[in-house]
Image: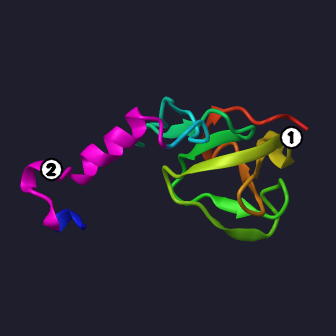
Amino acid sequence: MTSAHLPRSARLPGAAVAFAALALGALGPSAPARALVPAAAGCAAPRLDVDANSGWAQVVAAAPVVRQDPTADSESLGALRRCAVVPLRYRTEGGGGRQWYRLDDRAGWVSDQAVHVLRPAPHI
């Protein structure tokens, strides 16, 4: 029997079904815990997976360049979108006295001048 065959009073809207599933624990313990963290200026506050081991940053530059190596002279691998939240694998000292962050979800490095660190990445 489909919901179309049920009396109107017996039908639950999608939001009610989702709430009931959460209340009853249907998603189980595998659903990641999330925490609201302060955002970079002009960006919405992101929710981060607090169980993840990586660091996190929010992009603050208009179109920061992702570099192949942790120097400003290194080959460009593309750019990041402003206000995007990116996972960080680790950080290191790089060219120009800057901190550079190795991205965890793609190849490349981004300068500390381009991001607002939300959760620090390990130093190597």
Farthest left residue in view: 8
Q: Which quadrant is home to the N terminus?
A: bottom left
**Residue 2 image label:** none
Which residue bears the numbered disc 2? 10
Query: Which stretch is magenta?
Result: 5-26
Q: Amino acid at mark 1?
A: Glu
Question: Residue 8, position in %: x, y?
Answer: 8, 55
Secondary element at image label 2: helix
Q: Which residue is pictured at 42% across the width and 43% down the height?
A: 43
Residue placed most toward the observer, 35 or 79: 35
Q: Residue furthest front?
A: 1
User: In the picture shown, does residue 75 fall above or below 55?
Assistant: below
Crowding at mark 2 (Cα within 10 Å: few <14, some 14-19, many 20+): few
Residue at left offset 69%, top offset 42%: 112
SS under mark 1: strand
Q: Is residue 20 magenta?
A: yes
Horizontal placement of 98 versus 57: left or right? right
Q: Nearer the viewer, residue 1 or 106?
A: 1
The residue under label 1 is 93
